[in-house]
Amino acid sequence: MTSDSSPRLAEALGAGAVVLDGGLSNQLESAGHDLADALWSARLLVERPEAISTAHLAYFRAGASVATTASYQATFEGFANRGIGRGQAARLLTDSVRLARDAARRARDEGITRPLWVAASAGPYGAMLADGSEYRGRYGLSVAELARFHRPRLEVLAGAAPDVLALETVPDADEAAALLRAVRGLGVPVWLSYSVDGERTRAGQPLAEAFALAADADEVIAVGVNCCAPEDVDRAVGIAARVTGKPVVAYPNSGESWDAAARAWDGRATFAAERVSAWRDAGARLIGGCCRVGPRTIASIARTLEAG
């Protein structure tokens, strides 16, 4: 099921680049919401769901065609730590897709006519731990154990009928293998996106080897990188396109770095919209931003790609 009778996302990628949204968390924080919590933006699925829909709408207004749901850090285990049972947790996961659909309908009511899609976010195992291990990988779990962790949440998200499952910020090729195993038979296309450092995953594997896992996976409509420095995207797009022959997804951070000890961002933003033309020319077809990338930058990306 696609948003408001939009064409399938995989088909749209054959026609040109599609603009993704930016960081959901920074948009929520800019609206005054406190996300200093182990559930991060998923906390608002419980407390302020309408704020999530409004944040999605801001990105549609800016020119994005894909809204990525607030389910990145939403897991049965994480909710259980808050005393939320599996039934309610499943409803909250489903709500994350519904809220993005609601934002698409509101955008239509405002006169936005371009195709709009919903990507259901599934973050790595480390996101549930909320201890920074999502940027390291190597959790000490087997591929089979990781697949068993991911499968129930992915089943619920797939049941909510998003246009695509976003397997994102994956730090480790082993976890990517687990996720690709976990999505088999769900009937929803996916994109697979690694968090990287240079030309390696955060766990240290060469990107060519990591991307190759998705080359023959029929479910995967795009493969690439996110939640990394913009400079890392410059190198990764060409590798992903060459190794897999698939469209590439690219949505880096602003260029600032996260200081885990101080729990604050440091440095300066280096993400300029002008970079995206080179990414598109190298094979990127889903282009947007991650942490600290807001509607203003997404609007610049949309203008740049449209002009191209």
Image: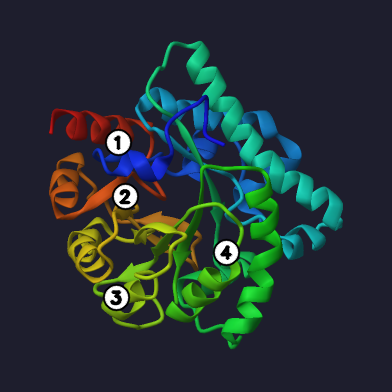
Residue placed under numbered mark 4 in the picture: 183
- Label 1 sits on a secondary structure element that is helix
Callouts 3 and 1 close, C-beta under 8 Å: no
Q: Residues within 10 Å of mark 3 (few under 14, many from 20)?
A: many
Mark nearer the N terminus (3 vs 4): 4
> Which quadrant of the structure image shows residue 34?
top right
> Gap between marks 4 and 2, in whole Å?
30 Å
- Identify the amino acid type marked 1: Thr
Discs 3/4, front: 4
In the rendered image, the vertical position of residue 173 relative to residue 25, given as above or below = below
- Identify the amino acid type marked 3: Leu
Q: Which mark is residue 297?
A: 1
Q: Position of residue 285 (x, y in %)?
A: 27, 47
Q: Position of residue 21 (x, y in %)?
A: 41, 39
Residue placed under numbered mark 2 in the picture: 254
Callouts 4 and 2 close, C-beta under 8 Å: no
- Identify the amino acid type marked 4: Val
